[in-house]
Image (cartoon, rainbow, N blue to C red):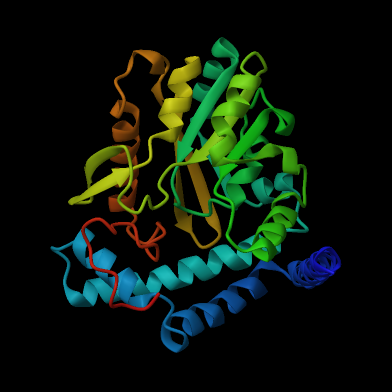
Amino acid sequence: MQIKFVGHMKILRSLAVYLILFLMVLLSLLPLCVHHLFANILAFILHKVVKYRVKVVNLNLTKAFPDLSLEEIQHISKDYYLHIADIFCEVIWSLTRPYSYIKKKGVFTVEGDQQLAEAFEKYGNLMVMLGHSGNWELFIGFPVYCDNANFDYSQVFTAYHPMSSRFSEELFKKMRCFHQVTEENLLPSKNILRQVLSHRDEPRIYFFIADQCSGGKGQVETNFLGLQTKWLAGAEAVAGKVGMPVAYVGIDKIGRSRYVARCEMLTEGPSDCPLGDITTAFTKKLERDIKANKVNWLWSHKRWKNILNYKNINK
């Protein structure tokens, strides 16, 4: 009976995923300007009605930018919710648009990719570190956005943290794999080292979003936005194991539904770097980009659990 129940739940979950995906596809057929209208409404609901993590956002901003006035913090907070709503609606809009179309329309462009192409050509592999800036979900079309790409989707792999909800996990994978990407290109972060070692002789690029909240359990600690911040050092540890060059990509929002990814090399010799050096270099570039565009980061995460009191505020 238990096996049958589990089987039925799995079928129902898959049906619900496909139903939601079908509705998203229908919505995606609408023009981008309509999605901007949806985003305006969604931002208002998140910020003023549901008040989704408003206190978390305000606390993070206040601690990261203590010199800003309350009015300035509230202004950034308001713009942040529109930014998050834009990301959500842009992802739905992009479902029925090829990445080549997204590039042609100027929604996502890339600068400095020649450096990455040269490193990939020279070493045969590459680790790319990025944060939750810009629209990181659209970043998956990176091989198409690049003018100098010497790699394709079969060679690009993205590390991610599996979700606790099986429903959300299945929906996430279906959305990510709607275009050229396959599930084989999505690697749970806990398996990334094994994957890299197993395929070390194959030409591959690994994308690693390296600013997830570590809950105060990271191996590397830096002063980030004026706060002592702990970071997981998985990306640099993996790169160091196989001598894989490491690059940074910062995604800047230069206008509504206008993103530019700027590429920079961090090191071509990770094996010679003491543990923490690469992560620290990454955090400095990420901090630079956040200060230049304060709205353009995922402020609703409880990133500083080791030093800030999030216990008495809304989830």
- Is residue 254 toward the left or the right of residue 73 in the image? right
Report the residue at 40% width, 18% height from top. Answer: 270
Q: Residue 163, image x and y in percent?
A: 58, 57
Query: Where is residue 296 shown, x and y percent of the image?
Result: 40, 57
Marker count (numbered)? 0
Placement of the C terminus among the 4 image quadrants = bottom left
Q: Name which quarter of the figure residue 58 lies in.
A: bottom left
Identify which residue, 248 or 292, lies in the foreground.
248
Residue 288 lies left or right of residue 9; in this view the side is left
Going by the picture, which residue comes out furthest to the left? 67
Q: Residue furthest front?
A: 1
* In this view, 279 is above or below 256: above
In the rendered structure, the answer to whether residue 69 lies left or right of residue 46 reads: left
- Give the residue displayed 74% in from the left and 43% down from the top: 183
Whether residue 25 appears in this view of the structure is no
Examine the rendered structure and indicate whether residue 233 appears above or below residue 61: above
Q: Nearer the viewer, residue 110 or 195?
A: 195
Viewer can see residue 256: yes
* Left/right of residue 270 with respect to residue 161 in the rendered view: left
Rendered view: 133 above or below 90: above
Q: Residue 101 in the image: x percent, y percent?
A: 72, 49
Q: Residue furthest top?
A: 122
Q: Residue at x 75, y 55 (%)?
A: 174
Q: Nearer the viewer, residue 181 or 285?
A: 181
Image quadrant holding the N terminus, namely: bottom right
Residue 218 found in image quarter: top left
Q: Residue 277 or 13: which is nearer the viewer?
A: 13
Dividing the picture into quarters, in which one does residue 159 lie? top right
List the single residue furthest toward the bottom: 49
